[in-house]
Image (cartoon, rainbow, N blue to C red):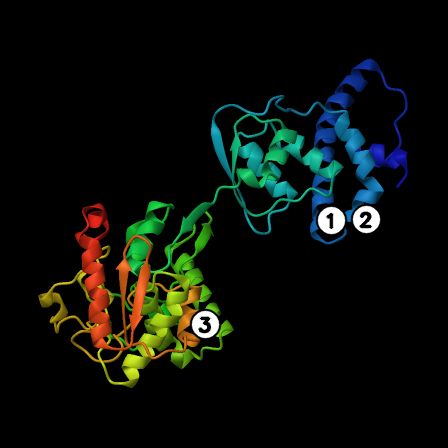
Amino acid sequence: MSDDEFEALLRGSGQPDPPEEQPEQRSRREHREGNKSAGALILVIVLVVIAGLAGTGWWAWSQYGERVLAYLGEEEIPDYASDGTMTEVLIVVEQGDIGEDVARKLADQGVTASFESVYQLLLEDTSITFQPGTYRLRAEMSAAAAIEALQDSDNRLLYRITIPEGRSVTQAIETIAENSDIPLANLEAAIDDPSVYGVNPPADNTYLQPLEGYLFPATYEVEPGTSASALIQQMVDEMISRLDNRGVEPDQRHEVLTKAALVQREAKEPEDFFKVAAVIDNRLEDGMPLQFDSTVTYWENTFGTVWTTDAARENADNPYNTYYYTGLPVGPIGLPGDIALDAVLEPAEGSWKYFVTVNLQSGATVFSDTLSEHNAAVALLREWCDDADNAVYCE
């Protein structure tokens, strides 16, 4: 297409300029062609966008891009001249959005003065891309400032949620609700049926929480608007991935997670995790009850204490009670992390059958082979707790 033909297209006609007209005729024609020119401009832009969607955008741009920009340059495009007001505007860039979509959202939500001010810059620099996400921008920004803000990851709105190892699934969803826009009620409903996430633990649903142990404790970056079920699925998938990477077969998952949750709750120092795992195996092999206080406090929901009562230890209604029942509890008592999983799969070598933390501040723990040795270590703990300076740790 020649330059004359291109200019004729923008004017709304495929023919050369007509002969000289009288002033009155020229006035009527110019009015009509003014409207045609605006329509032609929109048509050219749309054609470029459509060409891009069809995979031929680069060809179209190489043929007509400079002339489109030159023509656009003749028009006064509304644009703000500042970095914006104090009014915050959230812009959501969705997967699959192209430059036209982003330019339209910016204009429609009052961030930029016009669609064209942004779109022109995108045509000038085809290397500009946008990552999906929710971004904090401001009202009345210049097109250049808005584009720059959308490319700055610091402006991306994400909820950063950290679930520490050893927390229960109930504690985990409370943390999620407190640190995101996901309502607690939605999270409670989302964890009600574990089979939705491919989890089928043998423990029946009358127990505390059948999804216990199956959410991997970690820091998650959550997009605004994420559903409760989508996040729970992500956390379950992460745990299953960790198990698969360690060679744990599907039919072994529940037992491994049950042991790992015990280790996570009982061990203090990293090296102790592997010793606690050994104690579990040694006691199970000898048919001894595990007698872990953590299985009592889990059912009683009395986290944060190292002491249990005689009545709680004798409670047969607690299916997790390893004082009353021999063997592993019916399921995990918390969310184990990587080190706990490693410890269960590769426990330390040793004949220990007992352990007790003798310094609740430092986490120093004594492992023993015999009951008499263990009782001596328990006496050290009580002596340590009798010191008034340590009372806060012994509640």
Q: Nearer the viewer, mark 2 or mark 1?
A: 2
- Asked if 365 appears above or below 103 in the picture, the reply is below
Distance in Å between CA atoms under marks 2 and 1: 8 Å
Residue 29 in view here: yes
**Residue indicated by mark 2:** 59
**Could you give the CA–CA distance between mark 2 and mark 3, rounded to whole angstroms?**
50 Å
Mark in front: 1 vs 3? 3
The answer to whether 259 is drawn above or below residue 88 in the figure is below
Residue 28 image offset from top left, x and y in percent: 75, 20
Which comes sooner in the sequence, label 2 or label 1? 1
Q: Is residue 177 left or right of residue 68?
A: left
- State if disc 1 and disc 2 touch (CB < 8 Å): yes
The disc labelled 3 sits on which kind of residue? Leu
Q: Residue at x 54, y 34 (%)?
A: 108
The type of residue carrying mark 2 is: Trp
Q: Which mark is residue 209?
A: none
Residue 206 visible in the picture: no
Q: Give the image quarter of residue 125.
A: top right
Q: Give the tally of numbered discs.
A: 3
Instruction: Specify few, some or many for label 1: CA neighbours under 10 Å numbering under 14, 14-19, or 20 or more.
Output: some
Which residue position is annotated with label 1?
A: 51
Residue occupied by mark 3? 243
Q: Is residue 240 left or right of residue 188?
A: right
